[in-house]
Amino acid sequence: MTRAYHEDRTHGTSVFHLQVYSHHDKDGFYFVSQHWHEELEWVYAEYGILHLTVHGRSFTLNPGEFCFINSGELHEIRSTGESLHHAVVFNPDFLDFALYDACQHNFIRPVTKGRLLFPTFCSAFPPEGREQILFHMQEIIKLYHTLPSCALLSIKIHILHMIELLFQKDCFLENTLSPKGKDSLDKLKQVIEYIHENLAQPISLQTLAKICFMSPNYFCHYFKQEIGKTPIMFINEYRIEKACEMLSGSDLPVSDISLSVGFDNFSYFIRKFREYKGVTPKKYRLLCK
């Protein structure tokens, strides 16, 4: 599974801007490539192992662990083996009150405007706080999928309880991204968009570096710092993921798929596919059909 780098789909409904995605992956092939969105995303691994990269930092979610992804943060997620995970996704403005008051000013607005950031990994919380956060997250997931009476109100109350806990435990982080840093990050997002749109064509480091107004050497350093992998690794990985979509969704010959995602050397494509997926393209197609 892959998504466009800027995910602009609507989450939830016009009257309740929150959605819970629950995904069971039986084969260990689940992968969402680098992307970002304005919504907050809270991920909980019920069972199985998830590997995430958020703002260039890689970490593993084990069963019972959770993480927070802030608005605008580049991130990707992949599974190892069979897994079940849930993602609570909602627009930060969902938390705003119509009547501006001290609660809005001191607690809600700093979060919705991005002045305060959620800590990424659950290890940022003391054990007691971690258990309380996990309880509220599990309740949100259960309420969303069962929709008992007052479920929507209860979900919002649980979210506010979580925010209260983060303030009580002093876990929120100050957003220290400078205007210059934001500009560089915006250009990096343009690079990812360029890669997605020109996947079938040769892509040079010089071209990508030019988008960021950087030298190729510095661009490679900056890209790895923010994405967690080199540009070449990112391009190959994304090409393999697009090949996976075509293998499971069409009957095109493997050689044609290889060319359509930018691999002009068929042997290199097979080698890279096996390296990333652990199976050959033919075996992958059989498993996913």
Image (cartoon, helix red, strand yellow):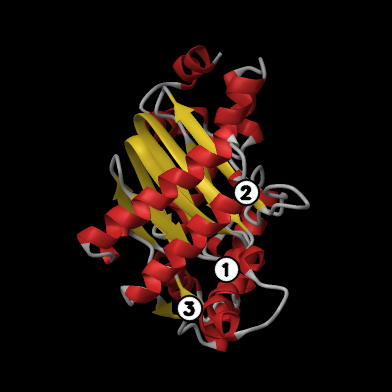
Q: Secondary structure at mark 1?
A: helix
Report which residue position mark 3 lands on: 116
- Which amino acid is tagged 1? Leu
Which quadrant of the figure contains the C terminus? top right
Residue 179 in the image, given as x and y percentages of width and height:
57, 87
Residue in the picture at 53% in, 75% down: 111
Report which residue position mark 2 lands on: 152
Instruction: Report which quarter residue 110 is drawn in.
Output: bottom right
Disc 1 to disc 3, C-alpha distance: 23 Å
Determine if residue 88 is in view. Answer: yes
Within 10 Å of disc 3 (Cα), the crowding (few <14, some 14-19, many 20+) is some
Instruction: Report which quarter residue 165 is drawn in.
Output: bottom left
Within 10 Å of disc 1 (Cα), the crowding (few <14, some 14-19, many 20+) is many
- Which amino acid is tagged 3? Leu
Report which residue position mark 1 lands on: 188
Q: Earlier in the sequence, mark 2 or mark 1?
A: 2
Which quadrant of the figure contains the N terminus? top right
